[in-house]
């Protein structure tokens, strides 16, 4: 065992947390464990003096008090307020790094929190966030007196609700006059009600500066849970997975050979696997995560809604999260898109959009407008309708019997003028039979981040309009800030008739997608029941309230945290790092990007690589060994990080990818 971190928190202030930490440390050291203890932050410490808690912990370890505390502030308030009074702001990441460095030098590091779990460290983060970041198991100190069941249950719920491991509860006899039978009764009730072990009762210690007395007192506790090897579920998960799971877009013969990444948790731009290793999430968990993983505001929104109701149908009923989200989406969407239809997957939103376009034309007296125009290299999802407008060989070979034929014009990526000409010619020929043109504005993402100019989009939209075709903008990938604007179409100055949203709609939390349309299109479906203009389309979980509640919270964050500002800064940082480090490397043919959406295409000179070499895949596996998660699209390595990624993290991302390319393709390291 080395580097284990165990956090000690209290059900409140003054419950004997420091004495418990000192006693645990003393007992473990006596038992031969190289245990150290540190207090993360101490407040109410006059300048030039030592924090009392640090003196106690230092005494147990026989070190100066300064080595037992990371930050001290004079004001006896929360760390947030005490730091602010001195014109400072704590940084959870810096605290976590210091703690990890200390832990690396001993078997077990006890980290004493400040007060309880939800004490604020920064305007946004609490002690609980620090413990989450550390992946620390938690020991809860609770007073062995009246009221302890309630306080302990609240603390345990707050810990488990944030995915923390609770090692156990210790009841601390702070007075020395507790009734043993009453304490035992409380202990039994806590174990039963909270579903966590009670490690024992810490008897009152008359002189807490007596290290032997501390060790003696904690000797009666069950300490094995602190030192016993952590359960690593990797093997069991992989075994079950290999036996029973069918993964999307994954060749089983490859999967069998790989050591799969088994993700357990995430915080900010980082993922953590079942064995505790951290990876930087360079692709936002497939282009979804917007504000980072486990954002406190999004977590809270999900929990609050779960507390009310997890699901209630949207067929013939409504609810606040669904109705209010629709109102809020309409307020930020490209002008005129005022109606919101919910689905779960992006593909389902595209299916609904196609159907809405077809029927809207029909209801306006144009049943002959039954064709769809799509772009070459388009991707719109994997259901039959979506594949019909986003075919690519060889992936869709053999599907003809379930697909409809779409009209395809060349992707604008290589030659925008030719693409416009082809679209114009097609519409001249059969524009009066076209229901809609469907495009991915600015970036054809799944094709390998193929980009086009805003002016191409403006011309294509104008052509469609001139010929009476509707414009469907599929912003499942480009929506919510990925290209630097909230929506790519609006950023390009184009207002679609129908807008498809997905991926980032809930900040990357839950499956929710949406189709937005104009009031004018919506009205075409409004008629007496007997005319059968009802949109007979929907999914069981349409408008799921938890997903909608999180989507609302995500939209609020765009305002409160200036997420678009972060996205633009990150895009600039990434572009300059990539130009400087990656572009000149051998094997790098082209770097395409718009906003944070980035594709690094690998080739041998100008010649595409032999697909059998699986170069893109090998680069991403090499990046993973360097602690970074990215994914290839063929031999294009895709970066598409959360919009809140810091410059320092972007640097880690690009360094790992550079190293991975060097490892697989060669060239200077
Ligand atoms: C991902 C994607 C889809 C499909 O979304 P799912 O949620 O995977 O069904 C549709 N269109 C575009 C542009 C996408 O990138």
Image (tube, grey):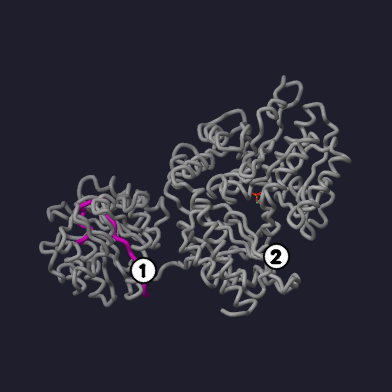
Tell me the residue that label 2 is attached to. Answer: 634
Q: Residues within 10 Å of mark 2 (few under 14, many from 20)?
A: some
Q: Residue at x 23, y 67 (%)?
A: 68
Q: Quadrant of the N terminus?
A: bottom left
- Residue 322 image-quadrant placement: top right
Tell me the residue that label 1 is attached to. Answer: 100
In the rendering, at what x and y percent does residue 299 appear? 45, 47
Given residues 217 and 627, the one toward you in this image is: 627
- The residues colored magenta run 1-19
In the rendering, at what x and y percent does residue 401 appear? 84, 49
Mark toward the start of the polypeptide (1 vs 2): 1
In the rendering, at what x and y percent does residue 336 appear? 63, 32
- Can see residue 573? yes
Q: Residue at x 22, y 50 (%)?
A: 77
Residue 650: which numbered mark, if any?
none
In the rendering, at what x and y percent does residue 92 appear? 36, 59
User: Is residue 299 shown in magenta?
Assistant: no
Asked if residue 158 is positioned above or below residue 200 in the image, the reply reads above
Residue lying farthest to the right in this orientation? 429
């Amino acid at each position: 065992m080395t580097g284990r971190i165990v956090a000690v928190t209290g059900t409140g202030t003054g419950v004997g947390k420091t004495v418990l930490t000192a006693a645990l440390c003393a007992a473990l050291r006596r038992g031969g464990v190289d245990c150290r203890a540190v207090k993360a932050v101490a407040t109410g410490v006059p300048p030039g003096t030592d924090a009392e808690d640090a003196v106690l912990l230092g005494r147990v370890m026989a070190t100066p008090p300064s080595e037992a505390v990371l930050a001290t502030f004079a004001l006896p308030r929360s760390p947030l307020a005490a730091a602010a009074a001195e014109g400072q702001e704590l940084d959870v990441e810096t605290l976590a790094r210091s703690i990890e460095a200390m832990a690396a030098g001993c078997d077990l590091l006890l980290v004493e929190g400040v007060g309880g779990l939800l004490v604020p460290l920064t305007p946004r983060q609490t002690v609980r966030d620090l413990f989450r970041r550390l992946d620390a198991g938690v020991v809860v100190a609770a007073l062995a007196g009246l009221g302890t069941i309630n306080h302990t249950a609240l603390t345990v719920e707050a810990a488990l609700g944030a995915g923390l491991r609770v090692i156990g509860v210790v009841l601390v006899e702070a007075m020395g006059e507790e009734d043993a039978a009453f304490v035992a009764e409380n202990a039994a009730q806590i174990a039963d009600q909270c579903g966590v072990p009670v490690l024992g009762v810490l008897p009152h210690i008359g002189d807490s500066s007596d290290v032997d007395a501390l060790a003696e007192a904690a000797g009666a506790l069950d300490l094995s849970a602190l030192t016993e090897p952590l359960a690593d579920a990797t093997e069991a998960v992989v075994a079950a997975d290999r036996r029973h799971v069918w993964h999307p877009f994954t060749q089983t013969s490859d999967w069998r050979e790989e050591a799969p990444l088994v993700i357990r948790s995430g915080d900010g731009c980082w993922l953590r696997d079942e064995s505790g290793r951290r990876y930087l999430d360079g692709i936002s968990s497939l282009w979804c995560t917007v504000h980072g993983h486990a954002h406190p505001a999004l977590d809270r929104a999900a929990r609050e809604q779960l507390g009310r109701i997890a699901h209630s149908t949207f067929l013939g009923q409504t609810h606040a999260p669904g109705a209010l989200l629709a109102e809020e989406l309409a307020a930020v969407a490209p002008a005129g898109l005022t109606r919101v239809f919910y689905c779960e997957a992006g593909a389902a939103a595209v299916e609904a959009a196609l159907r809405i376009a077809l029927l809207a034309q029909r209801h306006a007296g144009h049943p002959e407008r039954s064709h769809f125009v799509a772009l070459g290299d388009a991707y719109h999802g994997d259901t039959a309708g979506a594949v019909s407008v986003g075919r690519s060989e060889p992936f869709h070979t053999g599907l003809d019997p379930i697909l409809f034929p779409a009209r395809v014009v060349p992707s604008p990526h290589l030659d925008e003028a030719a693409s416009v000409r082809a679209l114009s010619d097609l519409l001249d020929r059969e524009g009066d039979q076209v229901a809609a043109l469907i495009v991915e504005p600015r970036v054809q993402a799944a094709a390998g981040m193929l980009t086009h100019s805003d002016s191409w989009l403006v011309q294509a939209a104008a052509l469609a309009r001139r010929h009476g075709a509707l414009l469907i903008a599929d912003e499942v990938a480009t929506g919510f800030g990925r290209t630097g604007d909230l929506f790519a179409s609006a950023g390009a100055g184009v207002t679609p008739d129908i807008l498809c949203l997905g991926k980032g709609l809930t900040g990357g939390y839950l499956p929710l997608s949406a189709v937005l349309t104009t009031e004018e299109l919506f009205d075409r479906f409004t008629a007496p029941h007997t005319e059968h203009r009802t949109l007979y389309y929907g999914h069981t979980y349409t408008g799921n309230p938890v997903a909608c509640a999180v989507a609302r919270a995500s939209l609020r964050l765009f305002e409160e945290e200036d997420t678009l500002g972060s996205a633009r800064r990150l895009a600039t940082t990434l572009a300059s790092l990539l130009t400087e480090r990656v572009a000149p490397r051998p094997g790098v043919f082209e770097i395409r990007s718009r906003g944070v959406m980035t594709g690094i295409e690998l080739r041998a000179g100008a010649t595409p690589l032999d697909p059998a070499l699986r170069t893109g895949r090998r680069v991403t596996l090499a990046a993973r060994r360097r602690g970074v998660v990215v994914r290839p699209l063929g031999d294009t390595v895709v970066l598409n990080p959360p919009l809140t990624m810091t410059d320092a993290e972007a640097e880690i991302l690009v360094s790992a990818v550079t190293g991975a390319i060097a490892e697989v393709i060669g060239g200077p390291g």
